[in-house]
Amino acid sequence: MTTQEDVLRVFERGKQTLLQEVDIEGLRAHNRKKPKALIDKVTTEQDAVGRLLEDGQYVGIELYGTVRCPMSIVREMVRQIRAKDIQNLRIAGQGCYEQELLVNTGAIKASDWTYTGLEVYGISPSWRRAVEGGVVETVCEWSNAALAWRFKAAGMGVPFLPVQVMQGTDTLRCSSAMVIENPYGEGKVAIIPALVADLGVIHVSRADKYGNCQIDGITGFAREMARASKRLIVSAEEIVDTDVIREHPDRTQIPYFLVDAVVEAPFGSHPGEMAGSYVRDEPHIKSYYTDAKDAEKAQEYMERWIYGVRDHEAYLDLVGRDHLETLRLGKEV
């Protein structure tokens, strides 16, 4: 018979329901079916997004502020959301500018949210309108660490992880975490549920054609999310020979067998930055923030910079190749 001492005490529950089912066995089953052979996965943004983005998915986008944001893929997602009338997407919200563009489509209905803003310029105008207007129906809050560790739990194959973060904060109260009695000692511990993404999108410094990926500078939560995503699109500043990857195997953050599509995208993080390669385009980001304060001007921005160009190469032409060269490290900005 179960006694009172056998039951763990729950001190607090976050008020939000889970936006994505904790389906560890589903992730395992999906990954078992992925091919393990060395297959050439190089393709275009249009093909990768067209094959792998679907209505109703939970989408994870990995970045660190505007560092390594997979913007060439995000812009293609925006184009195909409109073209295919994709709706009801849920998203991991740990970003800045890219989340503004996605929410402007009207397709984002829920977000696991850490920070979504334009940093020094202020709170995200389009996100504020979407949340206050009910377009984004549910916002579930997490700390940056908690969201990364949720992906880590899924990659480890466990349904949750015990942590010390968020306790005593409104962030926990607005999440779907719990605070329970420590089963191995005194005090309390928070537990956070594993997070499995239907589709993950990551930008890296370099990759080979099979999907082995290396990242220069801060790695964010790329390792964790790559292992927690059923499908994974990787864009890379350059695609290199596998021998280049093998020269420094310790730098390989994402192994090939996790990846479904590889896209070569120089300046793929623009207007964000890439460690060791180029700085962020400050005037461009500031101009978006200025425009986005007005909903109509935000859509004009979308028409010019996303819907009005056919692909990433056309976008780079619109930005200006000479201007892009001024952003490279070692050049005058």
Image (tube, helix red, strand yellow):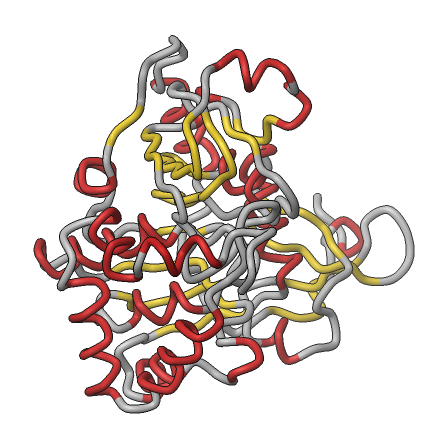
Comparing 294 with 149, the one in front is 294
Identify which residue is drawn at 66% across, 57% down. Answer: 145
Question: Which image quadrant for residue 276?
Answer: top right
How many numbered discs, if any?
0
Q: Residue furthest bottom?
A: 294
Identify which residue is drawn at 32% across, 75% down. Answer: 137
* Location of residue 41 in the rendering, given as x and y in whole percent from the top left corner: 31, 22
Q: Which quarter of the rendering shows the N terminus?
A: top right
* Location of residue 75 in the rendering, given as x and y in whole percent from the top left corner: 27, 56
Comparing 103 with 140, the one in front is 103
Identify which residue is drawn at 36% across, 56% down. Answer: 322
Comparing 294 with 94, the one in front is 294
Q: Residue furthest right?
A: 186
Question: Which image quadrant for residue 305?
Answer: bottom left
- Side of 125 where 22 appears, left or right: right
* Location of residue 236 in the rendering, given as x and y in whole percent from the top left corner: 42, 37
91 in relation to 31, above or below: below
180 in relation to 55, above or below: below
Identify which residue is drawn at 35% across, 43% down. Answer: 199
- Side of 118 where 125 appears, left or right: left
* Location of residue 109 in the rendering, given as x and y in whole percent from the top left corner: 29, 68
145 in relation to 111, above or below: above
Comparing 6 with 281, the one in front is 281
- Side of 288 where 314 appears, left or right: left
